[in-house]
Image (cartoon, helix red, strand yellow):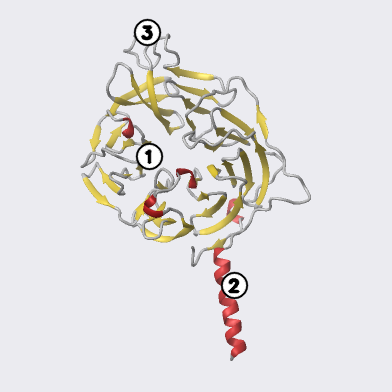
Amino acid sequence: MCRSLTLFLFLRTTLLLGCLSAPLAAESGSQPIPELTKIESADLPIGVIFFALSEDGNTFIAGIDYSVGLYSTSDYTPMEKHYERKDEPSATMENTTSLGMRANIYDLGYIDANTWYFVGRTLIENDIRVHVRTIHPPQEVSASIIDEISYNAFVSSNKNYIASSNGLIDWRTGKYYPAKIRVLEPKWHIVPTLTPDNRIITYPKQKTVIFDPLNDTIEVWKDATSIGNSIVVTPDNHHVIGLSTANYKCTLWRWPERKEIGHCSKRLRGIFGKYPEYLEVLALSPDGKRFAIGVENNVRVYRIEPFQLELEASTPGRLVALALSDDGWLAGYDDKGSLRVWNIGTSSLVGQYDFPSVGWDANSGYKLAFQPNSNKLFLKRSAIEVFEIPKQTTQQKPEAIPGRKLDNPM
């Protein structure tokens, strides 16, 4: 009887420990880790605050406080620039000819491969506008007023609308659909989430609220709050990732039912939610099949369906940026200046690049992005920097990647 009880306890302990374990990335061995090749180009912009890479990988947009530009990824040369210098005419709006006009830039992004936007306010205007432009032909489609408060200048988009914390804009026509209540004091740098079914998830007065401006409804989601800067919804509108307010763990829900599927981290937030922003970093693959969560110097990659842990790895410092590709690459950048790239299929560290230590700036807004259909990785620090992933590294097909289904996730 005692032997049976001992065996039972041993097996139970083993299973519990196994639930908290993960496929660890191999970070040392007989072969040295290749150094990522950094591409040198005088045309890559510097002093960058805002950055986004197009879904087809052909262009990127970059902005500083008072100017924004569209660039080609083939040679990094600018295709358009707006409000570039104080002493030059504005090239943004056809009806503006004033010399010396400058703008404050707050946000930018892509709607699709040929349509992009930036949010700004010129010095002669009191309101903040989102300017939507096409690449071919290079023209402005619309310029819509969203607010007068810079706190509310952050937006997100889908194929049909642009969302601020206060409502929806049909970017093709400029028609505005306001939310039922006005968001006066959102948390700084919190980005509203625009779902594929045109609802807005945002955070007025430290609550998570779901607006549906098209149907004029509002609902408080008491069980969830943002991770990093926002709650993330997958492109197929089937899943959502955020923090559970019950235990402040990274959590995967089924959407729009909001049925909890499982957890993907230990407790993240401190008492009363007061914690450094950089403690949580979240990345979603472009196809929405995987996500990565970075907490301090630990990163985990999960397949969403079925929900399973595919990779766990570590970095020398605290993670400040993550990126996933559709074909199985993970990239991480930490506050010690270490850039690392892993092959998820082989659970191996395949490349790294270490920058000289320059100190940690919590407001730098570091970003990583894999260029589709290439072996290039973009990193935004104070400048845009481009790296080549070693071509000799083979990938395992995503469907064949071994993983462990989380029947009882953390």
The crowding category of the residue bearing disc 1, from other C-alpha atoms within 10 Å (few below 14, some 14 to 19, many at least 20), is many
User: Which residue is at a point 32% across and 24% down the rendered structure image?
Assistant: 142
| Tag 3 and tag 2, C-beta contact below 8 Å | no
- Helix, strand or loop under label 3: loop
> Compared to 315, does 123 lie above or below?
above
The residue tagged 3 is 99
From the viewer's perspective, tell me whether residue 118 is left or right of residue 327. Answer: left
Label 2 sits on what residue type? Thr
Residue lying farthest to the bottom in this orientation: 1
Q: CA distance from mark 3 to mark 1?
A: 33 Å
- Helix, strand or loop under label 2: helix
How many discs appear? 3
Q: CA distance from mark 3 to mark 2?
A: 71 Å
Q: Position of residue 259 (x, y in %)?
A: 36, 60
> Compared to 244, does 174 lie above or below?
above
The residue tagged 2 is 14
Question: Front-most of 75 and 278?
Answer: 278
Q: Position of residue 125 (x, y in %)?
A: 28, 19
Please tell me which of labels 1 and 2 falls first in the chain: 2
The residue tagged 1 is 191
Label 1 sits on what residue type? Val
Question: Front-most of 200 and 85?
Answer: 85
Residue lying farthest to the right in this orientation: 30
- Helix, strand or loop under label 1: loop
User: Which residue is at a point 62% across and 35% down the rendered structure image?
Assistant: 357
Q: Position of residue 247 (x, y in %)?
A: 40, 60
Please tell me which of labels 3 and 2 falls first in the chain: 2
